[in-house]
Image (tube, rainbow, N blue to C red):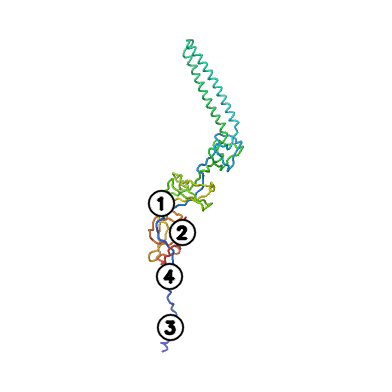
Amino acid sequence: MKKILTILYASVMLTACEKSPEPLSPPRPALVTIVGKSAANNAMVLVGEVKSRFESNQGFRIKGKIIERKVDVGSFVKKGQVIARLDASDTNLNAASATADVRAAEANQALARSDVERQRLLVDKKFISQSSLDKYEAQLKTADARVNQAKAQAAVSGNQSRYTALVADRDGVVTQIRAEPGQVVDAGEMIAQVVDTKQIEVLVAVPESRMAGLKVGDKVTIKLWADREKTYAGKVREIAPAASSTTRAFDVRVSITDADEAVKLGMTAGVRLAQAEADEIIIPTSALTQIKGKSSVWIIDKNGIASPREVAAGQYTENGVMVTGGLNVGEMVAIAGVHTLIKGQKVRPKFETNIEAAP
C-alpha cells in the first residue's frame, strides 16, 4: 500500500511540474501597398540655375593700356555705351601717318596722270612710239593701285583708333569686371561681362533616362527656392544635342515667360517637367531593400505570408523608385519594416492611408 501511495505522489508532482503550452503569437501588422503603374502625369522636378539667355564677354579688338573704366559690377548699360577706353596715342599717330600716305599716293597718281596725257599728245603727233605711251600708262595704273592701298590702310588705322573705346553690344547689366585702369590687355581679353536681363531662363541637367518625350516648346512650371509659394510659367527653349561627358546628362534651357524683379541671376530654381505615362512600376523607396547585395522587395501573398523577391531597380524619382523587372501589377509589397521580416513569416496586411502625392 505504501508503494502505491508513493507512485501516486510522484505522478502528481510530475503533472504539476509540466508547463502549459504557450499560445501562438498573432500575426504582426505590416504596412503594404498594391503595385500599380506610374501616374498618368508623371512629373519630373529638376534643380537648376537662373541664367540670362545672352551673356556677352566684352573685350577690346586691339591691345593696349586701359586709361579709363566707366562702369562697375551691377551697372546697367545701354547698347553703344562706352565701358572702358585704351590709350589712343599710338593709334592716333598711326592714323595720321596713314592719312599722309594717302596724300602722297594721290600726288604720285596726279603726276602719273599728267605724264600719260602729255605722252598721248606726243603719240598723236607721231613724236614718240606707242610703246613709250604704254610705259607711262603702266605707271599710272601702279599709282592708282597705291592710292587704293593707302586708303585701305588709312581705313584700318581709323578703325584702330575707334577700337580704343569699348562699347556695350547690347542692353544689360554688368556682372563681372576683369580689368582696371593702368592694366595692359591683349586683344580679345575679357574686360567686362554684360548679360541681358530681359530674357531670363533656367539651365537644368536632364538625366538621359528621362529624355524620352521631352521636346522644345514643352510647357513647364518653375519655383524659386527663395520663394516656394510663387510659381512661374516657362517653356523648353533649347535641348543640348549631346550629353555632358562629365554628368551624362543633357543641358536643357527653360525660358521664364513671366519673370519679374524677384527672379535674380544665379538663383536656384526647381523646374517641373511634365511627361507622359511611363511603363515602369513605381514603388515607395522604403519598400526596396538589399538582400545578399541584390535589390529586393518583400511580397505578401493572399494568405499574408511574406517572401523576398529580387527585382530590377531603375531611376529614383520624387514619387519613389522605378522597378523595371520582377514585379507585376496588382501584387502586394511591404513598405515599412522590411529589414525585420523573415521568409515565411505570417503578417497582417495594413494598407497605407493619408499618403499625399509628391508636389
Residue that mark 1 sits on: 276
Q: CA distance from mark 4 to mark 3?
A: 33 Å
Give amino acid for label 4.
Pro
Q: CA distance from mark 2 to mark 4?
A: 31 Å
Q: Is residue 115 left or right of residue 12?
A: right
Residue that mark 4 sits on: 26
Residue that mark 3 sits on: 12
Residue that mark 2 sits on: 356
Residue 101, horizontal then vertical, whole percent:
56, 24
Q: Residue at x 42, y 73 (%)?
A: 23
Q: Nearer the viewer, residue 261 or 267?
A: 261
Instruction: Say which label, 2 or 4, has the lower sequence index.
Output: 4
Q: Residue at x 41, y 51 (%)?
A: 276
Q: Nearer the viewer, residue 233 or 187?
A: 233
Residue 246, horizontal then vertical, whole percent:
47, 47
Disc 2 is placed on an element classified as loop
Disc 3 is placed on an element classified as helix
Residue 64, horizontal then vertical, whole percent:
58, 34
